[in-house]
């Protein structure tokens, strides 16, 4: 992923660096260059990990992050071992198909790579990571579907934002961080924030969009603009600043109150060091943690622009933002 | 196996049989201090109770951590008849509690009992109590108060190649760290940290790593052995030391994992992989300290973890000892 990131962000007048955990930092200097605004979107995606092989050569596996296990059966996957190996997800026992079970979870499933145990052991090792084989494709109405849009959509938002910031003046340094290991416990953002100690931060992630089965619990809609979060995890002035920037620049947006901590990098960034004023913007997404995650490209572009205009509108001294 | 390794298993016996539930690790710290005092430059205990033993050197700051605490029970209520009610301290296996003996720090012993005529519904709620053989609350209170902790007893037995005891998790880790410490000849600045409160959320390791700010951390602990009759293929006894890949608290950096595997292969040390989706260890908080610490994990497979009758093998212990020694001879450079 790192080389891909550098490929995308190299086009900007910015410094790129990387830390031991794998976080990537893209630093774009501001005019005053006194204080730093952190943007954070996570690099990792949910996946699978090889645990052991049985005597027929089938590969058993566990999850990395909260993958939607119901959707795994009959998927094509790639085991990233000594070399990339294609496999298909199959059932431990066909008998279960006739049982009353509605879906199959991780313990019912195996990966078939078409080899005997002897050959499998040479090619695959316990601990090898498995991803789902899937190319993104474009749908009608500027929507796209694919794997890992959680949170490559957020990474794209950061690219759009930096692109905008090449055209408009901004006083403060912007450090866009592509964080690691969000899906297993917000780990990269935790150490990354400690390294750069920003004045303020905005995390970018995805959020559930309305589908038929979300009933009244989800009001966020695909294509209706980026989502601005508010609640105890979010600094009220960053929330209102983002809202003002959206209104002034006629960018459509949606509001999402979250009562507790958000399940995003914003959660650990806020509590880093002595505390950091933190905001959160999200891209509406359907079918989260499956290989057919669906988003609207318009939301991504709008979200990047919103962040750029917000950063450009920040006062000269960010310290005034830290008061309630 | 190459080389002659002479591990002093009588020390392991002393360590496993001592009393040290989470938050009450003093007895263990005392034993370790006594044993190590002739081999080290500096010994200190921090506010949480971590024992930090330093072998000074001019090289890298390396943290070796093993937790001292064991799972146990805490008394919550004493009834009129002198029965003690309790909660678990750490991840006790409740199904295995009935009729086990427990021991308090003052060497008061008890037996875990439950009502004979209990409905199935009541059983699932785990209405266990501790019977210390008294007739009244007053008598009980002479020995035990609310808040006192007890551990599951379990004699130390050397059964040929296998060892059976209570608290192999993780006095075995302390034991291996101590043996490595005793023989360490390198130039690095090595901190052997015997941590507290791992079983209740890896708490001691968190503050110790913050204070030490190591360049590299290696955590030594035990892990689940899956080789019971119906389950096989995964981590099992006699297959060597387990090199940590993933648990609920860490995904070990591939660079660290490969460094460990290379050293194991080069030295003909038998090893396997540890990949578990449940359970965390000290490696979790340690690798997330400040801007992040390169961290690896070494684990010895143990059957019946947290039961009071844990089983491990000498072959696995020796391969863990050898791996840790070799890793320290060729420390990872980022």
Image (cartoon, helix red, strand yellow):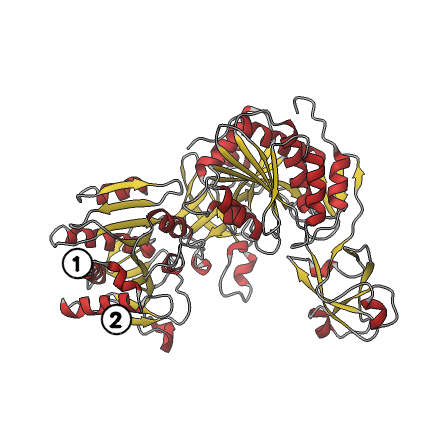
Closest to the observer, B264 or B134:
B134
Dot 2 falls on which chain? A
> N-terminal of the two: label 1 or label 2?
2
Q: CA distance from mark 1 to mark 2?
A: 21 Å
Residue beneath disc 1: A312
Which residue is at 17% across, 54% downward?
A171
Q: Secondary structure at mark 2?
A: strand
Residue A90 visible, this orientation: yes
Counting from the top left corner in percent of width and height, residue B114 is at 79, 68
Would you call the spot at circle 2 few (<14 residues within 10 Å), some (14-19), or many (20 or more)?
some
Q: Which quadrant would residue B100 be assigned to in this image? A: bottom right
Q: Which quadrant would residue A257 be assigned to in this image? A: bottom left
Would you call the spot at circle 1 few (<14 residues within 10 Å), some (14-19), or many (20 or more)?
some
Left/right placement of residue A154 relative to residue B332 reads left
Closest to the observer, B172 or B196:
B196
Q: Decide: is B305 above or below B80.
A: above
Counting from the top left corner in percent of width and height, residue B103 is at 79, 56
Q: Which one is in front in this view, the residue at disc 1 or the one at disc 2? A: 1
Closest to the observer, B304 or A139:
B304
Which residue is at 16% across, 54% downward?
A170
Rendered image: mark on residue A254: 2
């Amino acid at each position: 992923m790192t080389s891909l990131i550098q490929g995308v962000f190299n086009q900007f007048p910015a410094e790129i660096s990387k830390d031991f955990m794998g976080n990537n930092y893209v630093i774009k200097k501001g005019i005053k260059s006194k204080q730093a605004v952190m943007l954070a979107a996570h690099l990792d995606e949910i996946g699978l990990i090889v645990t052991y092989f049985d005597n027929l050569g089938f590969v058993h596996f566990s999850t990395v992050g909260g993958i939607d296990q119901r959707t795994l059966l009959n998927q094509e996957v790639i085991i990233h071992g000594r070399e990339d190996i294609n496999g298909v997800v199959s059932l431990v026992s066909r008998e279960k198909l006739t049982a009353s079970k509605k879906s199959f979870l991780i313990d019912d499933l195996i990966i078939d790579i078409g080899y005997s145990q002897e050959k499998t052991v040479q090619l695959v090792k316990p601990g090898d990571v498995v991803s789902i084989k899937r190319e993104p494709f474009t749908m009608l109405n500027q929507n796209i579907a694919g794997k890992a849009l959680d949170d490559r959509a957020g990474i794209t938002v950061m690219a759009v934002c930096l692109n905008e910031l090449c055209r408009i003046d901004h006083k403060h340094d912007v450090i866009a961080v592509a964080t690691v290991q969000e899906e297993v416990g917000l780990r990269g953002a935790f150490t990354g924030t400690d390294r750069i100690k920003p004045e303020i931060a905005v995390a970018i992630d995805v959020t559930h969009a309305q589908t038929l089965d979300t009933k009244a619990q989800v009001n966020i809609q695909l294509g209706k603009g980026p989502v601005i979060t508010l609640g105890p995890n979010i600094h009220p002035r960053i929330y209102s600043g983002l809202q003002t920037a959206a209104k002034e620049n006629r960018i459509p947006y949606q509001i999402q109150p979250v009562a507790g901590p958000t399940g995003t990098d914003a959660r650990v960034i806020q509590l880093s060091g002595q505390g950091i004023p933190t905001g959160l913007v999200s891209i509406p997404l359907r079918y989260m943690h499956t290989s057919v995650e669906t988003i609207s490209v318009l939301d991504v572009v709008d979200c990047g622009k919103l962040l750029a205009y917000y950063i450009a509108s920040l006062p000269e001294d960010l310290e005034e933002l830290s008061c309630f | 196996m190459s080389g002659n390794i002479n591990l002093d298993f009588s020390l392991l016996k002393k360590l496993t049989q001592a009393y040290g539930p989470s938050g009450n690790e003093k007895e263990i710290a005392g034993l370790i201090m006594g044993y190590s005092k002739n081999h080290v430059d500096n010994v200190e205990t921090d506010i949480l109770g971590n024992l930090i033993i330093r072998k000074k050197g001019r090289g890298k700051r390396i943290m070796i951590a093993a937790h001292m605490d064991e799972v146990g029970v805490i008394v919550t209520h004493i009834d009129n008849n002198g029965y003690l009610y309790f909660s678990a301290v750490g991840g006790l296996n409740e199904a295995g509690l009935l009729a086990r003996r427990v021991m308090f720090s003052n060497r008061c012993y008890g037996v875990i009992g439950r009502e004979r005529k209990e409905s199935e519904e009541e059983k699932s709620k785990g209405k266990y109590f501790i019977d210390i053989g008294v007739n009244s609350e007053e008598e009980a209170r002479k020995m035990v108060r609310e808040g006192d902790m007890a551990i599951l007893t379990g004699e130390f037995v050397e059964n040929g190649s296998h060892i059976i005891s209570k608290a192999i998790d993780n006095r075995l880790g302390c034991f291996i760290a101590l043996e490595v410490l005793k023989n360490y000849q390198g130039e690095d600045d090595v901190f052997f940290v015997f941590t507290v409160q791992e079983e209740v959320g890896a708490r001691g390791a968190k503050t110790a790593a913050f204070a030490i700010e190591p360049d590299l951390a290696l955590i030594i602990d035990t892990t689940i052995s899956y080789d019971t009759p119906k389950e096989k293929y995964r981590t099992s006894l006699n297959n060597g030391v387990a090199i940590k890949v993933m648990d609920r608290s860490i995904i070990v950096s591939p660079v660290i994992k490969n460094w460990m595997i290379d050293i194991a292969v080069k030295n003909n040390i038998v090893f396997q992989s540890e990949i578990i989706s449940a359970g965390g260890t000290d490696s979790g908080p340690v690798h997330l300290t400040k801007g992040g610490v390169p961290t690896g994990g070494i684990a010895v497979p143990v059957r019946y973890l947290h039961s009071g009758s844990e089983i491990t093998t000498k072959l696995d212990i020796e391969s863990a000892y050898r791996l840790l020694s070799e890793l320290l001879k060729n420390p990872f450079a980022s």
